[in-house]
Amino acid sequence: MFRHTKKLQFEAKPEKPDAVFAMKLQELIGGAFGEMTVTMQYLFQGWNCRMEGKYKDLIMDVATEEIGHVEMLATMVARLLEGAPADVTAKAAKDPVTAAILGGMNPQHAIVGGGGALAADSAGTPWNGKYIVASGNLMADFRANVAAEAQGRLQTARLYNMTDDPGVKAMLKFNLARDTVHQNMWLAAIEQLQEDGLEGPVAPTALFDEENQEHANTIWGLSDGTAAPEGRWASGPAPDGMHEFRYLDDPQPLGGPASAPPPDPALYGTYA
Amino acid sequence: MFRHTKKLQFEAKPEKPDAVFAMKLQELIGGAFGEMTVTMQYLFQGWNCRMEGKYKDLIMDVATEEIGHVEMLATMVARLLEGAPADVTAKAAKDPVTAAILGGMNPQHAIVGGGGALAADSAGTPWNGKYIVASGNLMADFRANVAAEAQGRLQTARLYNMTDDPGVKAMLKFNLARDTVHQNMWLAAIEQLQEDGLEGPVAPTALFDEENQEHANTIWGLSDGTAAPEGRWASGPAPDGMHEFRYLDDPQPLGGPASAPPPDPALYGTYA
Amino acid sequence: MFRHTKKLQFEAKPEKPDAVFAMKLQELIGGAFGEMTVTMQYLFQGWNCRMEGKYKDLIMDVATEEIGHVEMLATMVARLLEGAPADVTAKAAKDPVTAAILGGMNPQHAIVGGGGALAADSAGTPWNGKYIVASGNLMADFRANVAAEAQGRLQTARLYNMTDDPGVKAMLKFNLARDTVHQNMWLAAIEQLQEDGLEGPVAPTALFDEENQEHANTIWGLSDGTAAPEGRWASGPAPDGMHEFRYLDDPQPLGGPASAPPPDPALYGTYA
Amino acid sequence: MFRHTKKLQFEAKPEKPDAVFAMKLQELIGGAFGEMTVTMQYLFQGWNCRMEGKYKDLIMDVATEEIGHVEMLATMVARLLEGAPADVTAKAAKDPVTAAILGGMNPQHAIVGGGGALAADSAGTPWNGKYIVASGNLMADFRANVAAEAQGRLQTARLYNMTDDPGVKAMLKFNLARDTVHQNMWLAAIEQLQEDGLEGPVAPTALFDEENQEHANTIWGLSDGTAAPEGRWASGPAPDGMHEFRYLDDPQPLGGPASAPPPDPALYGTYA
Amino acid sequence: MFRHTKKLQFEAKPEKPDAVFAMKLQELIGGAFGEMTVTMQYLFQGWNCRMEGKYKDLIMDVATEEIGHVEMLATMVARLLEGAPADVTAKAAKDPVTAAILGGMNPQHAIVGGGGALAADSAGTPWNGKYIVASGNLMADFRANVAAEAQGRLQTARLYNMTDDPGVKAMLKFNLARDTVHQNMWLAAIEQLQEDGLEGPVAPTALFDEENQEHANTIWGLSDGTAAPEGRWASGPAPDGMHEFRYLDDPQPLGGPASAPPPDPALYGTYA
Amino acid sequence: MFRHTKKLQFEAKPEKPDAVFAMKLQELIGGAFGEMTVTMQYLFQGWNCRMEGKYKDLIMDVATEEIGHVEMLATMVARLLEGAPADVTAKAAKDPVTAAILGGMNPQHAIVGGGGALAADSAGTPWNGKYIVASGNLMADFRANVAAEAQGRLQTARLYNMTDDPGVKAMLKFNLARDTVHQNMWLAAIEQLQEDGLEGPVAPTALFDEENQEHANTIWGLSDGTAAPEGRWASGPAPDGMHEFRYLDDPQPLGGPASAPPPDPALYGTYA
Ligand SMILES: [Ca+2]
Ligand SMILES: [Ca+2]
Ligand SMILES: [Ca+2]
Ligand SMILES: [Ca+2]
Ligand SMILES: [Ca+2]
Ligand SMILES: [Ca+2]
């Protein structure tokens, strides 16, 4: 069960409205790596976590924080949209500055949201449930969490450069910091999983004996770039300590021709 | 530019058809972490890579391999669907085994695909372009690549347990092995990026001075689970070597109340 | 079966083209509460209506009208797009007014629609079948119909303020009027359902005896705002005449801890 | 900002697992009218509310409760999936009962969720941000809230009949009760809005003078059913107290022919 | 403007209910090539048609017919769902025949639609506006119309083999016939467009002088199959009468390396 | 299996960057008829082709070429985005030219793609797997292929008029030429299918005896336009050589009233 205080985790006050930036900021609300994603991703991971204890408690701490991040951003968007030209007419739009604002803003911020945030990204695409990852395997999921926080911090950094409003920048500095600690935290949790003997670096820790050992260490050189063998992935020990990398220069296919069987006559596939 | 040989990278021959398993196998074709995703993810990453050389060449090698993985799985699905009961009538469906096959298969495999694979996942949801990640920042993207291969190997392992067809199992063993080497490879590439001084562990390597330092190392304890401070994320040095973790037991909000400004009268928000 | 006359239900002639407004007007065609939604919502409700007679006949009357509303709006959009700068080059775009039009218009109006309307909303998101509601329970569906017409009239009113074209305003006045009568009509139909003894105010009229009576009248105070108990929802009789409202100030959870069972080993969830 | 306790708002313990019912129960998590929808709908409405005080506080109370409803259902789904046949082989599936379970369950519950809930509905379609309504106009939004709770209670009632597990039924009784009080509560809030003079029954309270009065009270008889005029929507005063209903038996179109202007030559529309 | 009669264009009466077939039949309602698609595709094409006269009149005739096809199918689905086991419990589901029906039916037919049709396909994916094609170029659009009717007739033929209910088969025979005449009709309309001198076989009839003539007649042999040059596409005159086909056996790339420019520092792409 | 060379099939070098045009060009990458669609459509058709030989080899040749088209366009987009104003602040946006670029570009090109292409169309909607057609029936699929190439060439022609950059125009001339030869090629393949006796003009070549002959040749006049009978679809022989067209002026419905059966009480449909 959850409880709510009306106070924001961190202040979200722009110096002045900016409807164009409000649209861009939607990426951090409803984008593939926005706060709705990490909120739902961590909540489902926590609910799906099979061990009571430190991992589950950590996941629920962070999940709960993230709901408050959606709140901060939604509040910021509503404040950035204040005074956006909601009733501007065709004639007024001939002033280039107004026109630029109109051109650059998401019309749904006015028509649908009435000056409030949307559950969508900066291109207006709605958030959807396929953005989240919650598999029950903590190694696989923590990898996804690091990735989500890395993309999130990258997008926040880009947005930080797209405004000079001190109030917006102040909030984004907080968000950058949280994305830093969250990346560090999931990286530490990955180390912890291995220290606790729960998972290895390659997920899942299973079926290594059954998989084709001769295909578990080779990079297939299928593009004519010649530099790929220069990296540490082309020779030497693999990070899992179990394999020795090998680069195949001109690999040949191992299977027979791709072919589909004769069609069922009741399906009317073309055949003779 | 690309070229194609009709031979499969690895053999894809089931011992006998199994329409129910064909539906499940769709997860590895058109699921969020299926082969269409890694194909498109690596292609767009390669095309968006800003440095000529080993990173770009590696990405294009693997991207090109992944197209062939879609091919192997699509071929397998067509063969698993051979002889699925395309013309069975209501009467025949009263035989429980046939009924179970009918109940468990995706009707679109017959009606839409005519016995061939679909660009969809195991629940019939179509693949979409939001599954892929290609940001131009290699650290952020390689984190996403490890995550994708981890989820992919996990799903492959689960599917491996859901069949006893030796032909299917043989192919899945190959897939498991490729997911192992790809996880190792992206992990090695992450180390290489740091050795080459291109990126740090936290992405992007930027704005650390500007972000709120006092908020870049704290875990906020917002759920009443008590074990979260027991992990290595709660104290000691963070993986980036730049921060010291700290756990906040009863953190207080730092911002003022969340509130939206008075609405523009032309938008007819409720207000008094 | 349907028949069509080429005449519009109401005139749809703008005084002059306006490609930016054409994009915004798409909200009324393919938005979540646009005319495609009410068309399909009422058609499926009518076909799914279980009683012959006045309710079904009303639904089909209005459904048929709504197809004509899509027609009016699609015609208006095509006329507003006349002469939009389809061949303007990078150079010409340096004129700010043209640039604003280009920036504010949906590029798909030219590239995909060839100057015609799209089955999409004002942010370019395609209409989809999840927007519609047709449950077979008329009370639940008429509630959804009132809601749809209210959102529709609200959006129409906002768009009315975004243009000063007398031809567009004339058509929107008609649309506003139709949204008014449709709201009134569905509200009247809700009263009629109760007068006819078919449904109560709370849908569905079933399982009241089985539901937890002690939880059917309490508002849980889970946010620290203090004004919620001031409303008429916090005490006194509920609209259904069957319950007495009560506000809980500091409600405690009634269940045990959220926890997931040990994972099936074949699924490789992390567990120890 | 939010806080979380590990205790569930209400107990969510099935007597025994049932993977088929787990799939159906997903409708209440990620369906168009599931708990994810009301959670996000009320959160965005609360953040977008323009008046401090009782309305906003109520919305935030209920929004916060709804997050806990997602939690209860996700926990129930994980428990219902316990022991689902994750490793069953083609051979085993020839037992009809096992086959039925396999046929009726969502394969993603095992392959993707590892035995945990998904952010999707009972047909496997992912939840998306277009399901929510938050317009800033409280009358329009409260109409949508009543509609959402009505559809939600209807679906809960249907699911209640699809199981005989006493633990599941106990939780659904609680859910039914909450849907009852929430319907009553939003209906009371609609009355309160009118008593407070903030909104009228038709949303938004604006532009009545400008809309076409002669079209604001007529039902157009466009389907050949003859019973539509028998309802109270066909004559007498409308619920808003401002109009007198009228039924038009054989209404004629008021506009000219639907026609699109000559195409821009640069768009290559067919024309002569 | 449209009018409606309650009579169906053709009878839609199954001999007896069949919930599994009802789910499959949804493909013809809300699938990519179902009746909702052709309804909306032809309506938007008609409204977007730039010439008054025979083409536009034909399109509107057929568009109006298609709305009635959705109606026939939605009626059939509701009748096929009669008596589907809406309240069956876990225990009852142990009867294999009932279990098969439950496994094979779409749970949303009961939970969401209350026994009525959905705006979705046979895998439960909602219909969306991207399925339709209405470009303003009649040749390009009539090609799409033939394709849609061909896929539609193919799917209808497959479904015809999946039932032995005489009532369903009777309706599908009518649908097959309509798909036949519609394919013939659009093929005739393509011939007519050319006879009238409005369009050539290749759409659009424009820019032939500007396009690279040396690349407008060659098939690039990029897969190692050797039989491709045996078809009439590999030599001889092309259907447009303007080109002579040529097959390139070992074609070489004409461009330089694919490479992306140095990244903007403000975007933090990896670069050195 | 596939191989890749770093050289592009054709050069993709703009004379200078143009972020607004980059957004428009996305239509040819991730639009419904963009290169991702034809890539995946032809790949799945090839893998689903049931006959070894010339048809399958042709499909795989073209499919492989299309992957290279995505590559050309993605490279062009990255080059067009060079130097787009990634860090422009609110103040700078008051310069109308900069503002227009900002207004007209997709913000995700900077925030998400870091200056690279997206798997989306010109309105930012992600590509999805429902765009492709691969039914196993070659006649039905080749019809769809002609349609896809026709829409693709039409969109390319429109985009050709929206730029005056000689480098972009040079690449689009190549693309136009490829769309011309591909249209001709699929038209030739349709003729070949008939010459080889594999399929007739109406797909599929089946069930002609069973379909309702009296409904397989009539155009139903359901719209009041009077010119429809003037076309060659209204009389004379149909293209399939098997039917004689007939136009019905005032066709009457053949079925009874649309009605749904009494609802199952467990579903709580409204009924009396
Ligand atoms: Ca966050
Ligand atoms: Ca792979
Ligand atoms: Ca309307
Ligand atoms: Ca609830
Ligand atoms: Ca039809
Ligand atoms: Ca192409």
Image: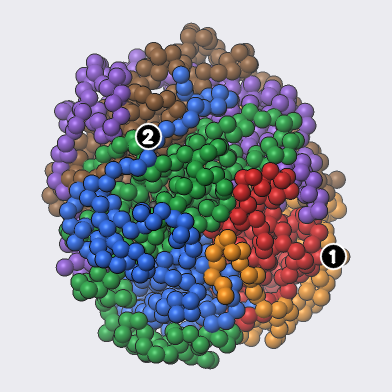
Chain colours: A purple, B brown, C red, D orange, E blue, F green
Three-letter amino acid code of the residue under disc 2: Pro
Q: Mark 1 = which residue?
A: D210
Q: Left or right? Give the position of C85 relative to E252.
A: right
- Residue F58 percent across, percent down from the top left: 25, 57
Is D160 or F157 nearer to us in this picture?
F157
Is F111 or E199 nearer to us in this picture?
E199
Visible residue check, residue B262: yes
- Chain of residue at mark 2: E
Report helix, strand or loop for mark 2.
loop
Question: Could you tell me how far apart the alpha carbons at marks 2 and 1 are, in whole angstroms?
Answer: 62 Å
Q: Mark 2 = which residue?
A: E257
Q: Residue A224 carries which label?
A: none
Q: Which residue lies at the image location 45% right of the left edge and 61% below the top edge?
A: E208
- Residue B150 percent across, percent down from the top left: 34, 31
Three-letter amino acid code of the residue under disc 1: Glu
Q: Which residue lies at the image location 78% right of the left edge and 54% below the top edge?
A: A90
- Residue F247 percent across, percent down from the top left: 47, 89
Foreground disc of the pair 2, 1: 2
The image quarter in which residue D43 lies? top right
Ligand 6 within 8 Å of disc 2? The answer is no
- Chain of residue at mark 1: D
- Image height check: is C56 above or below F111? below
Q: Left or right? Give the position of E242 relative to C87.
A: left
Quadrant in the picture for the C terminus of chain C: top left
- Residue C84 percent across, percent down from the top left: 66, 58
Q: Which residue lies at the image location 68% right of the left edge and 66% below the top edge?
A: C79
